[in-house]
Amino acid sequence: MIWSGVMPAMTTPFDSNLAVDHTFLAQHAAWLLGNGCTGLVMLGSLGEGATLENSEKVEILKTAVRVSAGKTPVVAAISSLSTANAVRLAKEAEQAGCQALMVLPPYVYTSDWREMKNHVATIIGATKLSCMLYNNPVAYKTDFLPAEIAELAAEHKNLQAVKESSADVRRVSAIREVLGDRLDIFVGVDDVLVEGVQAGAKGWVAGLVNSYPAESVELFNLAKAGKQKEAFELYRWFLPLLRMDTVPKFVQLIKWVQEQAGVGSARVRSPRMEIVGEELKTAQATFKTALANRPKVSEKPFSSFKGA
């Protein structure tokens, strides 16, 4: 497993009956990979994993594995209310052909380190797959501190990466200070991508990439190459959109942008509802400005991946 590059946190497309649209999912996945993404992260927060049944999750993973055809890794986000169900899903993901797991803290319950360590360690220890720990204290109210991450890494060789979504770029340096290069660090919040790479992150689990894969890959590559002037020019255009990844309605906003860009639908499952009113007006203004000033980046069109 190579943990590097831009890996989309893929949205889950729904048809008019809010069933998973596997035909569109396959085309979308193929388009993202065709434009330079290095893997697919399925079933995460952006993928509305909390509203999916386990059977739906497994079928989504199978679709992604079929599209990737072993050329790029499929990473299954493992999240559940219970440790036992999370372990079950981890084993099913391995059987479905996934190359790696992204391990989340449990939904709803915010615990101490003893309980949280037991939860994630049980999942990591239940598989031979390479694992990424997902740290998102803003969303899950559980903060994996660098010393705690080091403790897990010392005990589990297959823990090989961490998605750092604290929105504090200092955490990238703090993890490296404790662990050196033992773990590959991924930026998990879109609007700190350039800063995170400059601090030593090797990858990006991205959100707006669902609509703009070519721009996302170009931005990451420029930041990685240290081309600060070129990177900032692209970043400056992208930032108003990237900030949509940092608010409570990030799922609705990112799916709405997909619909506006002609590469998806704004449909979400309840309890989420599509944006309306002032939120919609603000999003429309942001998208209008972005569309009018979109930079020229070489991109393979979405339509060329029909039937994937």
Image (cartoon, rainbow, N blue to C red):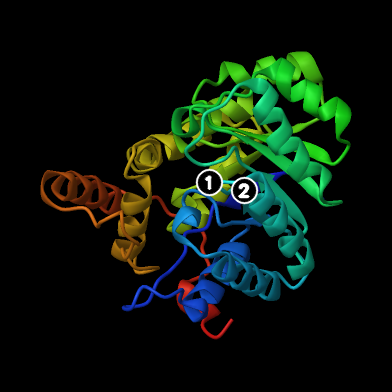
Question: Number of callouts in the render?
Answer: 2
The answer to which image quadrant residue 145 occupies is top right
Tell me if residue 133 comes above or below residue 62 in the rendering: above
Give the residue at mark 1: 206
23 left or right, relative to 153: left
Q: Amino acid at mark 1?
A: Ala
Give the residue at x 73% y 15%: 147
**Callout 2: 10 Å neighbours few (<14), some, many (20+)?**
many
Nearest to the observer: residue 284 or residue 88: 88
Which corner quadrant of the image does residue 244 belong to?
top left
Label 1 Cα neighbours within 10 Å, binned few <14 / some 14-19 / many ≥20: many
Q: Can the viewer see residue 294 in this picture? A: no
Residue ID at (46%, 51%): 46
* Left or right placement of residue 219 versus residue 296 in this view: right
- Describe the element under mark 2 as helix, strand or loop: strand
Residue 228 relative to residue 279: left or right: right
Mark sitting earlier along the chain (1/2): 2
Q: Mark 2 and mark 1 in contact (Cβ < 8 Å)?
A: yes
Q: Residue at x 43, y 54 (%)?
A: 296
Query: Which residue in the rendered view is the most extreme toward the left?
Result: 277
* Residue 90 vertical position relative to residue 267 in the rendered view, above or below: above
Relative to 123, say whether 255 is above or below: below
Q: Give how far apart the Cα atoms at labels 1 and 2 are.
A: 7 Å
Percent from the top left, x then y, of residue 293?
30, 48
Residue type at the position of mark 2: Val
Q: Return the residue at label 2.
A: 6
- x, y percentage for residue 207? 47, 48
